[in-house]
Structure formats: structure tokens, C-alpha cells
Image (cartoon, grey):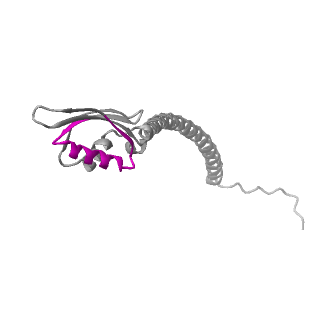
Amino acid sequence: MVSIIPKKTKKAPEWYNFGFYIAVAFLIAVVLGYAGLFYFEGKAWDTLQDLEDRIGQVGVKEEKLTEAKVLIAKRKINDFSKLLEVHKKSSNLFAFLESVSHPKVWFTEVRLSPESAKAIIAGRTVNFQTLDQQLFILGQQDLIERVELTNLSIGKSGETKFSLNISLNPQIFK
């Protein structure tokens, strides 16, 4: 049977409606929360990128300064190395003369010209024989190209005074 009499529809309890509105409000709050999080994440990301760019610029400046200092030091080292390569060690002559000197010969003056590889040496010895032996010793050395006796005299006490012009092998200065 069909009833034609309208029946009253059951109304949902009030708390159902209230619960529905709370659920909708909660859903809206969640959506707005996500939107806020995405917004703040974007802002934080932009700030992070800006800071990384600034750090990169500072790092680049510091690196450029450090690189410039290193290049200056490298250039100085290279210049110094070039100077050392062409530097002539004059002191090598003195060590050499010490090793080839006759025990009874005393050198009193040395005038050295490393550029032309020449030396003028003045000295004295007890007699001519000792001077001859010294000249022979010097003539036998590979580092001496030529020895020339330029000045010879006898001192007051009978000693022999002399001067030598010596042409040296340039290897002596290396």
C-alpha cells in the first residue's frame, strides 16, 4: 500500500549539522594551512637562494684575493729562481783557491770580475821556487784557463811578491 499521507521527515540531530560545519571548517583550515606552508616554503627557498648567492659572491671575492696573492708569490718565486740561475757564486773562487794553494804562498789581495771570469790575485811567498810550484799547480787546474804572472818583486825581508792575472772557467761560479 501506498500511503498518501505525508510523513514528517526525520530531522538530523543538531550536533550532526554542527559536526558537518566543524568538518568543513577543519577542511578549509587544512587547505589554508597547506597553502600557507607552500607560500612560506617559497619565501624560505627564495631567502636561501639569496643567501647562497651572497655567500658565493663573498667566497668568490675571497678566492680571488687568495688567488691574486698566490699568483704574486708565484711570480716572485719564479723571478727569484731566474736570479738564482744566473747568479754567480763568487765565494766558490775562494774555496777553490784554498784547495789549490801552496802551503808557503799567501794571497794578500783578490780582485774578481765574475762577469768576465777573470781575477787579479796579489800575494807573497818565501822564494821563487815556491812561486814556480804555485804557478804549476794553478796551470794544472781545469777551472783555470790561463795564468799570467804580471808583477814580480823581492820584498825587504827577501820574500817574493807577485801578481797574477787569471782567466777562469765560468763553471767555477756555478
Q: Nearer the viewer, residue 97 or 139?
A: 139
168 on left or right of 100: right
Q: Residue furthest right?
A: 1
Query: In the rendering, at what x and y percent does residue 141 appear?
Result: 36, 49
Q: Is residue 108 visible?
A: no
Is residue 133 magenta-colored?
Answer: yes
Badge count: 0
Q: Which segment did they paint magenta?
A: 122-149
Query: In the rendering, at what x and y percent does residue 113 appear?
Result: 36, 32
Q: Quadrant of residue 147?
A: top left
Query: In the rendering, at what x and y percent does residue 135 appear?
Result: 29, 44
Q: Is residue 68 visible?
A: yes
Is residue 159 magenta-colored?
Answer: no
Q: Quadrant of the N terminus?
A: bottom right
Q: Quadrant of residue 149?
A: top left
Q: Nearer the viewer, residue 80 or 164?
A: 164
160 on left or right of 67: left
Q: Quadrant of the C terminus?
A: top left
Residue at position x 83%, y 56% in the image: 6
Residue at position x 64%, y 43% in the image: 35
**Above or below: residue 83 compared with residue 26:** above
Q: Nearer the viewer, residue 156 or 100?
A: 156
Query: In the rendering, at what x and y percent does residue 9 appear?
Result: 76, 56
